[in-house]
């Protein structure tokens, strides 16, 4: 099995470590590719778009010819997880900040995202979330996190913080407002691998 992590900007190394932990837990022989250019996407079984700064990641995905190929992979059913900034990029609709910064969204999931809805870095927090499909709460780390304001069509919520949607799924796509790679818990990375 070959997983990929977009390595243009953001919290990518932590996802590599979490994927290796998920492979071990599931008893799967797997490798993790660092995706920096178009050819790095070849033969991937799944992909993670990490957190970071969504405008920067968007520009780099375009510069390195990754955006259209990621869209093709999604259409072909390849499981893709977007965390924090990656969640923003997977959405079909952003907020005023996304429009103002001319961030080009991948537009893959039927959802609207409010970037940095949970505030600035100093307002970051950790909380236990009930996630559909997990028996025990998940320790979610929120850092300047976006909020999934609404979902429609084939997109459905998998987790909420209060009344706010913080995780959603649409077929082979997972969007998370938070950083599962910083939790020390690989269950959501296992969820991605089980979608293959």
Image (cartoon, helix red, strand yellow):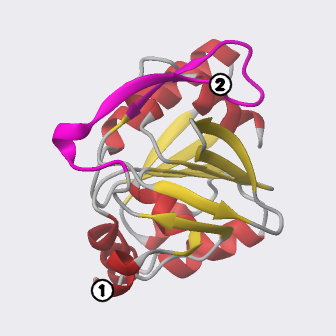
Bin the neighbour count of mark 2 within 10 Å (Cα to Cα): few under 14, some 14-19, many 20 and up.
some
Which residue is labeled 1 in the image?
A: 100
CA gap, disc 1 to disc 2?
34 Å
Q: Quadrant of residue 123?
A: top left
Viewer can see residue 157: yes
Q: Where residue 57 sits in the image (x, y, percent)?
A: 33, 67
Magenta span: 118-141
What residue sits right under mark 2 in the picture? 130
Q: Residue at x 42, y 54 (%)?
A: 146
* Image quarter hosting the C terminus: top right
Residue under the image location 61 percent in, 17 percent down: 137
Task: Classify residue 85 by image quadrant.
Answer: bottom left
Where residue 18 sits: x, y (%)? 46, 27
Image quarter hosting the N terminus: top right
Instruction: Determine if the magenta segment contains residue 149.
Output: no
Is mark 1 in CB contact (under 8 Å) with mark 2? no
Toward the viewer: 159 or 67? 159
Toward the viewer: 19 or 129? 129
Secondary structure type for disc 1: helix
Q: Residue at x 83, y 63 (%)?
A: 154
Q: Residue at x 67, y 12 (%)?
A: 136
Instruction: Spot the residue most to the left.
Output: 122
């Amino acid at each position: 099995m070959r997983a990929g992590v977009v390595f243009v900007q953001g919290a990518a190394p932590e996802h590599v470590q979490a994927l290796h932990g998920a492979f071990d837990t599931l008893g799967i022989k797997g490798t993790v590719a660092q995706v920096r250019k178009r050819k790095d996407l070849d033969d991937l079984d799944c992909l993670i778009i990490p957190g970071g700064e969504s405008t920067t990641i968007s520009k780099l995905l375009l510069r390195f010819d990754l955006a259209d190929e990621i869209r093709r992979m999604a259409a072909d059913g390849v499981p893709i997880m977007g965390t924090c900034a990656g969640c923003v990029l997977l959405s079909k609709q952003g907020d005023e900040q996304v429009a103002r910064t001319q961030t080009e969204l991948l537009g893959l999931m039927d959802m609207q995202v409010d970037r940095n809805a949970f505030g600035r870095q100093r307002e970051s927090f950790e909380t236990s979330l009930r996630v559909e499909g997990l028996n025990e709460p998940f320790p979610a780390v929120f850092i300047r996190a976006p909020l999934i304001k609404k979902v429609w069509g084939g997109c459905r919520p998998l987790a909420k913080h209060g009344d706010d949607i913080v995780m959603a799924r649409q077929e082979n796509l997972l969007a998370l407002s938070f950083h599962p790679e910083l939790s020390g818990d690989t269950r959501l990375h296992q969820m991605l691998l089980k979608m293959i």
